[in-house]
Amino acid sequence: MVDIIIIRSNSIVYTPRVTKIAKSLRKGYSIRVLGWNREGVSRKTIYNYIADLKLCNLKAPYGKPSLVAYFPLYWVWILSQLFMYRPKVVHACDLDSVIPSYIYKLIFRKKLVFDVCDRYAMGYIPPKFRTLYSLVNSLEELIGKESDMLITVYDKLLETFRRKPKHSAIIMNCVEDHAIHRDKSKDNDVLTLVYTGNIRRERGLDKIAAAIKDLDGVELVIAGKVMDKEVQDQLSQIPNVKYKGVLHVSDALALEACSDVMLSLYDLKVPMNNFSWGNKLFEAMMLGIPIITNVSSDVINKVGCGIMVDYNDKNQIKDAIVCLRDNRDLRRVLGNNGRKAFLQKYNWKIMEEELYKIYGNLLKN
């Protein structure tokens, strides 16, 4: 028997949140991590993970409706692992992993932590499919209400739950304070923009590329899994765009540390994106790098660590890039503001303490 099993279906090795939670909890508890090896992670990578990691080796597609047919097999595998290890607490990330975890809770009367990074219906089901949208949303609401602890990454995301359990908390996607050397010797005549994350249309990469294709002294460096081949092909036609492939979390941070500006754009026509407060903002703050974004306006305006833009306004995005290209002092001020706020409020050490309080209460009996 173990104290805690953490479960997430998507890319555990490349998911900083799960890695941080596992690293923190293993300091005081016996833990295991379960997931789904859809991306073909090597045995060596699994062995070298921060905690005891076991993956379901069922091949399945990414981002396609046919994925739904594979979920029952994944859920059966998860239940078999839970029945085997009998954890005192299951920490399930998002709806696709909480369903078997909830069944385990009911059968064995164990504790369930429902960690919501994305509302499933909002993120994956177009609102035009009203019946399906409503059913999935209601299921998420039900399990959220019946969980022993509901965790989200953002207060506005927590507010989307109409019914909440007795206990809930916010654990933001803050990052650890990594000692990463920033290369001060690079050519300062070229402004390096960086994007690390999935390559997909609703992240504004096509708009950014259109904004910089005629700009001198600007390059865009991107890294991440290609989810939209059409967007990747479009980007590959632009000389000042460089693609670095899929990187491990530490390598992605090192790439960001060598940049001048980070980018984080979300298409707000996707309902879930209106509640996004991704870890890229916190990575930029930790590294002392300004960010160009169209979300998290409350933090950006309060801290003064970046420039807000309209996602659909290519000229506004271009103006923000030119402004930062031509004003090194502004880049330094925005970066320093972010770094100061990171040290004071937006770092993982503070989130870790909140996590310890949660598990101290759950496991005290």
Image (cartoon, helix red, strand yellow):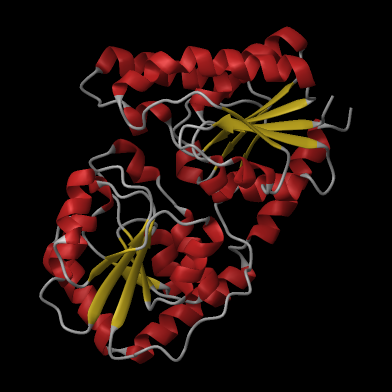
The quadrant the C terminus occupies is top right
Q: Within the image, what quadrant is residue 168 found in? A: top right
224 sits to left or right of 15: left
229 sits to left or right of 262: left
* Residue 36 visible in the displayed image: yes
Q: Position of residue 184 (x, y in %)?
A: 47, 89
Work out whether 351 lies above or below 127: below
Q: Give 287 or 216, whichever is nearer the viewer.
A: 216
* Residue 311 visible in the displayed image: no
Q: Position of residue 122 (x, y in %)?
A: 35, 31
At x 25% / y 27%, what residue is drawn?
126
Work out whether 45 lies above or below 344: above
The quadrant the N terminus occupies is top right
Q: Within the image, what quadrant is residue 179 found in? A: bottom right
At x 35% / y 68%, what residue is drawn?
194
322 sits to left or right of 279: left
Work out whether 36 lies above or below 359: above
Q: Give 45 or 345, whichever is nearer the viewer.
A: 45
Q: Give 61 or 206, whichever is nearer the viewer.
A: 61
204 sits to left or right of 124: left
At x 37% / y 22%, what residue is drawn?
67
